[in-house]
Amino acid sequence: MNPRRFPRALVAGSALAVLALGLAACSGGASANPGDDGKLKVVASTDVWGSVLSAVGGDKVQVSSIIHSPTADPHSYETTAADALTVQNAKLLLGNGGGYDNFFSKLVGQAAGAKNLVAYDIFKGTAATPDANEHVWYSLPGVEKVADQVAAQLGDIEPASKAVFTANATAFKGKVEDLFKRVTQLGVAHPGSKVVMTEPVAHYLLEAAKVTDSTPPAFSKAIESETDVPVAALEQVKQLITGKQVKALVNNAQTTTSITEQLVAGAHAAGVPVIDVTETLPADVTDYIGWMSKEVDVLAGALNS
């Protein structure tokens, strides 16, 4: 993947909301448009959100994720005619928003005339905060809110299954809450922990663990604006690692550059743990809880080292 950044989205910390995009929504009791197997067709921009749709919808939904490969880049993805048809035939669309998956916003616009189509942008309409970050799936409380909103909308589309969707969301949120408790306990057990990051992908997870991001602002700004990293900023990051002034290097494993390779190699040489995080589900993981549990395990291992 190539490195990429864009303007910060508007998001109220971890208090996320799922908001309608203004497409024609199903009125109460409106007839659903099930797939050939009787399941509701729902579509997510990435498999991360697709896994949430699956957890809440269960066997009542047929989930399609436009991005479903750990090598695909949501920022530069070019949609296909098949993608457009998939979205056009869906009853519910779920996108990240905030500039992260603009390709999906375009697909939503193309499908705007579809009868009873409902689409959601997880960022839309939220308030700006200084630490706004587009990688909202790392906000565990935010993911719980998304699950509630998805259950409510699916229940409106298919009232007969509303109790099932609500129960599924409750079970899913219970697992997410258990993860969140683990993360917050790390902050209690390891106060004052610091890390540096190649990209602020896991911002919300580290925030919940009370882990300080010591990455020099000039380094982060250059990465986010896709400009050359100042030599002084890069050297500062290297010194933090080689001097073992941080507990770990948090590395976006899906964006590899000569700079990130240097930092990862330096961390390994210095004996500083490398925490690899991703933006989509790894090839060996199919569900959100399994994926995020592994991420939390690696974080805990680094803080305990």
Image (cartoon, helix red, strand yellow):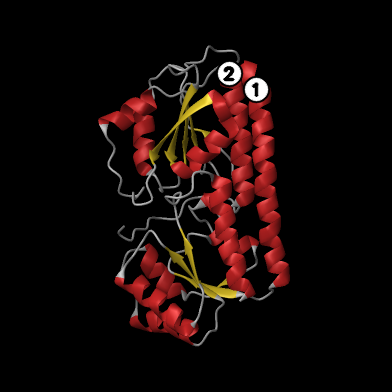
Q: Amino acid at mark 1?
A: Lys
- Quadrant where the C terminus sits is bottom right
Residue 172 appears left or right of 11: right
Percent of width and height locating residue 139: 58, 52
Mark 1 to mark 2 CA distance (whole Å): 7 Å
Residue 162 got which mark?
1
> Does the residue at mark 1 contact the one at mark 2 (Cβ under 8 Å)?
yes
User: In percent of the image, x 47 and y 64: which residue is there?
Assistant: 276
- The answer to which image quadrant residue 172 occupies is top right
Query: Relative to 71, is 20 above or below?
Result: above
Query: Relative to 61, is 173 above or below?
Result: below
Query: Relative to 59, is 141 above or below?
Result: below
Q: Amino acid at mark 2?
A: Glu
Q: Residue furthest bottom?
A: 243
Percent of width and height locating residue 217: 46, 73
Residue 228 appears left or right of 239: left
Percent of width and height locating residue 5: 37, 58
Residue at which label 2 appears? 158
Asked if residue 204 shows in the view, the reply is no
